[in-house]
Each structure stands twice: as C-alpha cells, then as structure tokens.
Amino acid sequence: MFRLIPKEVRFFEMFERSTRILVEGGKLLQELTSDFQNLSTHASRMERLEHEADQVTHEIMANLNQTFITPIDREDIHRLATALDDVMDFMEAVTERLILYKVKHLTPQFKAIVEVISRQIQEIQLMIPRLRALRHADILVHCIEINRLENEGDQALRTAVAELFEKGGDPLEVMKWRELYDLLETATDKCEDVAVVVEGIFLKNA
C-alpha cells in the first residue's frame, strides 16, 4: 500500500537551494581575503546569506514534520539540513568576529584555511545534486575529497597556531586570532560532517 503513496521529492530541491546559498557564502568569504578593505560590506552580505540559509533549513524541518513518506530516512534529512546550515553559520561567525575584533589585516594562514573551506564547498556543490539518484558512485569520491581537505585544513591550523604563539605579542590579539582560527577549523569540520551524512545516506540506499 505504501508504494502507492508518492514520496515527497521537494527535499532534494531544498537541499540544493541550501547548497547554492552555501556556495555564495564560500565565494564571499574568499572574496573577502582579497578585498579586505570592504570587510563591512562583505560581512553584511554574509549575514543576509546566513538568514537565507536559516529560512531554507526551517522550511525543510517544517516539511519534514508534515510529510508522511520521505525519499530518505527522516533522521538523515534532519542531519543533512543541519549540517549544511552549520557550515553557513560558522562562516558568518568568522566575518562577524572580524568586525567585532576590528581586525586590520589577514594572515596567510587565515587565507589558506579559507581556501580549504572554499574547495570543500565546491565538492559539496557537486555532491548534493547527485543525491537525487541515490546510487551515483561519484558521491563517495566527493566525500573522500572533502575529508582529505579537512585534514589539509587541520595542518594549516596547526601551522597558524604554532606561529601565533611563537610570535607572542599582545595576549589579547593572540586570543582573538586563536578564536578566529578555531571558527575556521570548525567550518572545515562542518563540511566534513556534510560528507559523513551524505556518505551514510548513499551507503544506506545504494
């Protein structure tokens, strides 16, 4: 009987909308590194994108509560929506802290980790639309690359923190930069969370 009830396919569309917003955020974060004098403008745009991402996430959750038959497990829909939203949240937190802490310049390590995040998001952009098929083997290729990039980000973070403490200087500045690096690292971790959720969905439905 349940086979006669059509599955709700709008979830895939909403995941793709969330991903498009995430891609815009990743591009904006990268633009900021080469156009830092316009930080306030970039931060305002990032805040708007974060609100848009929240709206899509709320829409997914509302539809999840109203849908009887879903194309993939309900908990997987919830986890993926949350994971995508988390990446956007932490990117926005980075720009918000840059404003709050009145940062005057960016370090090479900051830019390197932003580049890692940007590349992870590019992989997410390629991966999420392929969820519709649920059997697309390339999904795992993107998951592996996102995980590899997370390790690359960890290495960049270790280098950044080591240099931060080696240079010393104003303890308050050290604390500010340590938090900024931690936020960037968490963004890379959240990208990896997206890959973990997607890998689980693929293996469960392959």
Image: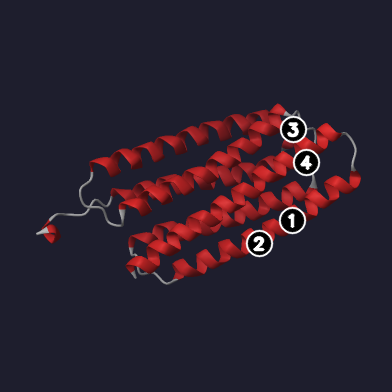
Circle 4/circle 3 CB separation < 8 Å: no
Q: Which residue in the structure is indicated by mark 3? A: 37
Q: CA distance from mark 3 to mark 1?
A: 24 Å
Mark 1 residue crowding within 10 angstroms, few (<14) / some (14–19) / many (20+):
many
Apparent side of residue 61 relative to residue 35 in the rendered image (left or right): left
Q: Nearer the viewer, mark 4 or mark 2?
A: 2
Question: Which amino acid, by three-letter code, is at mark 4?
Answer: Leu
Apparent side of residue 161 relative to residue 141 in the rendered image (left or right): right
Name the image quarter holding residue 174: top right
Circle 1/circle 4 CB separation < 8 Å: no
Question: Measured from the top left, where is residue 26 in percent x and y?
Answer: 58, 46
Q: CA distance from mark 2 to mark 1?
A: 9 Å
Q: Residue at x 77, y 32 (%)?
A: 103
Q: Earlier in the sequence, mark 2 or mark 1?
A: 2
Mark 2 residue crowding within 10 angstroms, few (<14) / some (14–19) / many (20+):
some
Q: CA distance from mark 1 to mark 4?
A: 14 Å
